[in-house]
Amino acid sequence: MESSLVDYFKASFEELKTKVTWPTWAEAQKLTVTVATFSVLFALAIWGIDIVMSEVLDFYFNGINT
C-alpha cells in the first residue's frame, strides 16, 4: 500500500513537470486580474439583488401587518 502511494505521487509530480503546459507570468497576471474583476462584479450583483429582495419583502410583510 505504501509503495503504491509513493509511486502515485512520483508519477503525479513527473506528469506536472513534463506534460502540463503552464501559463507565462504575464498570462497568469492577466487571468488573475480577470478572475478578480468578475468576482467583484458578481459579488456586487448578488449584493444588489439581496438589497432589492430585502426591500420587496419588507414592503410585502409591512403591507400584510397594516
Image: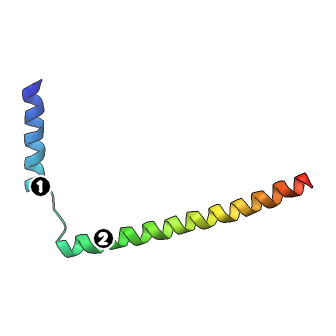
Tell which residue pokes out farthest to the top in this image: 1
Percent position of residue 44, x then y: 54, 68
- Secondary structure state at the residue bearing disc 1: loop
Above or below, comparing residue 19 to residue 38 in the picture: above
In which quadrant is the N terminus drawn?
top left
Residue on which the image places disc 1: 19
Give the labeled residue for mark 2: 31
Q: Earlier in the sequence, mark 2 or mark 1?
A: 1
Along the line of sight, the residue nearer the viewer: 18 or 5:
5
Q: Position of residue 25 (x, y in %)?
A: 18, 72
Quarter of the image where one finds residue 53: bottom right
**Residue 1 against residue 65 in the figure, above or below:** above
Neighbourhood count class around disc 2 (C-alpha, 10 Å): few under 14, some 14–19, many 20 upward: few
**Residue 56 locus on image (x, y percent):** 76, 61
Q: Is residue 30 left or right of residue 19?
A: right
Q: Residue at x 17, y 71 (%)?
A: 24
Residue at 33% x, 73% y: name it: 33
For mark 1, does the 10 Å Cα neighbourhood hold few (<14), some (14 to 19), or many (20 or more) residues?
few
Residue at horizontal 7%, vertical 41%?
A: 10
Query: From the viewer's perspective, is 61 left or right of 29?
Result: right
Amino acid marked by disc 2: Leu
Which mark lies nearer to you, 2 or 1?
2
The spot of residue 18 in percent (x, y) is 7, 55
Q: Secondary structure at mark 2?
A: helix
Residue type, mark 1 in image: Lys
User: Rounded to the nearest whole Å, what is the CA distance between mark 2 and mark 1?
Assistant: 21 Å
Q: Are marks 2 and 1 in contact (CB under 8 Å)?
A: no
Quadrant in the picture for residue 57: bottom right
For the point 17% across and 63% down, which residue is it? 22
